[in-house]
Amino acid sequence: MRAILNARIESAIAVYGRAVFVLGIDRSGTSMVSEVLSRFGAYAGPAEELCKADEGNPQGYWEYKPMQAFFGDLINGVGLSIWDPAFKPAIAGRADDPEMRRRVLELAAGMRPPGEPRESAGLWLWKEQQLVFALPFLRRVFPDAFYLITLRNPYDSALSYDKLRVVPALRGKVRLIGYSLLRWQHFMVDICEGLRTHPLKLIVPYEELVSRPREQCARIVDLLAGRGGEAAASERAAERMAAAIKPRLWRNHSDVPFSQLGSVSAAQKALYAYLSSHLDGDLEDFDASAYPFPEWSREYCANMSVMQWLLGSL
């Protein structure tokens, strides 16, 4: 049975290439990691179909618009809030929908530079926050995919998210820090649960990517190219990738360590400590019950999602 499964995976790779999915909370370095991947050679899509750079991300978002549209349809088609406990099994079941599977595989088959023949499918990347919600679907459709998970001090991410999402007229009146921290906790628990036994993954710490880019890029090369690769070629790749890192873009720093912040829950501190000690991606011992949520957290996050939709500005 395993031999049959492996043969099917190899056949799929030959047609659709090898996927790299970048997962993480907003403002945690997912765009930076995506640019690093593009310099390794992963194809993100034609430039005209990628979300444009702006003040929030001066070097671009690396988000492929047709992919975003597909996952929007996929998630909205479930008919449940992403915060509903029934959402995950429902989204996994959509992998059995022939139309959804056809559409996503058609997108995957097109993830190659213009002019590249179909038989030379290579490495490609998708980055989008919705991928975290669609993880049960992705695992079933792309069982051979690589995953890069970004880890940044969650409070710094929350500060950045707050500055970016709250319109000037509401600043000082509306704060998104607590919501961002709860959202981070949900994201990371879902990622760890969804990928606990998946071997092809790596946690990329944002602060170390900025301060020691060659070291972190070498880790990514080891995952994508294999540790048996030619040393000089791997070094050149890591050097090329590291050139994408611009420390000046690290604009939100916390003076107090995350473990000492009074506004952060004990579960969030423990989860951050766990992830920081498992950067190699070995999550076999992950136990979600060790990082409990307040009973009201799902309702609160669902209400915030509706508020964002209603206001259209947060």
Image (cartoon, rainbow, N blue to C red):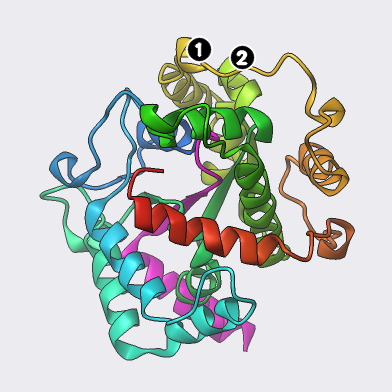
Looking at this view, is 250 or 18 the one in front?
250
Asked whether the beta carbons under mark 2 and mark 1 sit within 8 Å of each other, the answer is yes
* Residue located 79% across and 38% down the image: 264
Residue range of the region highlighted in magenta in the rendering: 1-28
The structure residue drawn at horizontal position 64% and vertical position 32%, both measured from the top left corner, is 152
Q: Mark 1 points at which residue?
A: 247
Based on the displayed image, in which of its 4 quarters is residue 167 positioned?
Answer: top left
On screen, 54 above or below 256?
A: below
Identify the image quadrant of residue 252: top right
Amino acid type of the residue tagged 2 in the rendering: Ser
Give above or below for 287 relative to 23: below
Left or right of 203? Residue 61 is left
Q: Report the front residue among 287 and 113.
A: 287
Give the CA separation, mark 2 to mark 1: 7 Å
Asked if 147 appears above or below 42 in the picture, the reply is: below
Mark 1 secondary-structure assignment = helix
